[in-house]
Image (cartoon, helix red, strand yellow):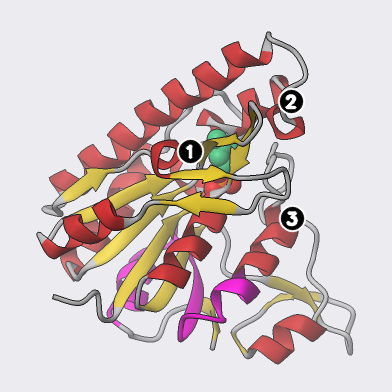
Amino acid sequence: MSNNSIDIIKLGGAVITDKTEYKKIRLFELREICEQIGEWGNPCIIVHGAGSYGHIKAKEYDITSGFRESSQIQGLMQIRKDMHELSSIVVEELIKANLNAMNFQTSSLIYSENENMQYKYFLNPIQKAMQLGLIPVLSGDIVFVEDGDFNIISGDVIVEILANNFQVNRVIFITDVDGLMVVNPETNQKEYLINASVEDIKSLSFTSDISENTIDVTGSMKGKVESVLSILRSVNEVIIVNGQEGKRVLDVLKEKDAVCTRIK
Ligand code: IP8
């Protein structure tokens, strides 16, 4: 069986957690999203962000600077433990929505062979799981780096790796905003982008942050735009949709009209 035409769904950390408060889950929003994915029910891979289960401790222990002092090891352990907890909650909600979800631990499958974050990975287990009809669930995580170092890997980068290694039709980012926000060069006003091409994305200027007033160690809007461009080299469409607004996620999954940003 080939992995033809799967979609990758990224559950943004800002929609499934409250990023301002350490380990605060948004269970209602998570459940609503899982139910919509369950109602759609097609083969996919799900990647979730860290939200307040990852970014707060990552900043506190300065994990993105790599190994500087032994006290950071406590932070590394705490983040891994917290991400395990968050992934368990996500998988539980997916299973309640009748999806055969199974968690795969990112830092056991992916590591970085140098400080420039060039990754080595072993994705065969994910492919084998999909052949059995399972829905693999991965997350942003800590990542080990050659020469005794460590860092953070964003869920967006994991999506890029998956998109480059599986046959993926669409990547759907579920966020807490209505899409990518751009500055209209004619009016100088901020507005959400609706339909765009790769060329549009390269020429537009984006506003600074997806969610303001929150800690994000993996780059927020700038990182998101870079990821989107990289992902579009190997998939047909990238969609950014608000997971807190009615049934928009289901509409997007079912290829119906919905408020969102679509980039082809
Ligand atoms: O929320 C970050 O993943 P993201 C992972 O997808 C950690 O950027 C542990 C902060």
When the figure is inspected, residue 131 is found, relative to residue 251, above or below; the finding is above
Element under disc 2:
loop
Q: Is residue 36 left or right of residue 178?
A: left
Q: Amino acid at mark 1?
A: Thr
What is the x, y in percent for residue 166? 36, 71
Instruction: Please state the horizontal and vertical placement of residue 194, each as a whole percent of the image.
Output: 59, 84
Q: Do labels 1 and 2 touch, CB within 8 Å?
A: no
Upstream in sequence: badge 1 or badge 2: 1
Identified by mark 2, the residue type is Asp
Q: Which residues are magenta?
A: 228-254
Residue 237 magenta: yes
Q: Which residue is under mark 3?
A: 209
Picture quadrant of residue 84: top left
Q: Which of the two residues, 121 or 264, is positioned nearer the viewer here? A: 121
Residue, x 35% and y 77% (percent of image)? Answer: 167
SS assignment at label 3: loop
In this view, 6 is above or below 56? below
**On-image quarter of the C terminus:** bottom right
The residue that label 1 is drawn on is: 17
The residue under label 2 is 62
Looking at marks 1 and 3 on the same chain, the residue that comes earlier in the sequence is marked by 1
**Total count of labels:** 3
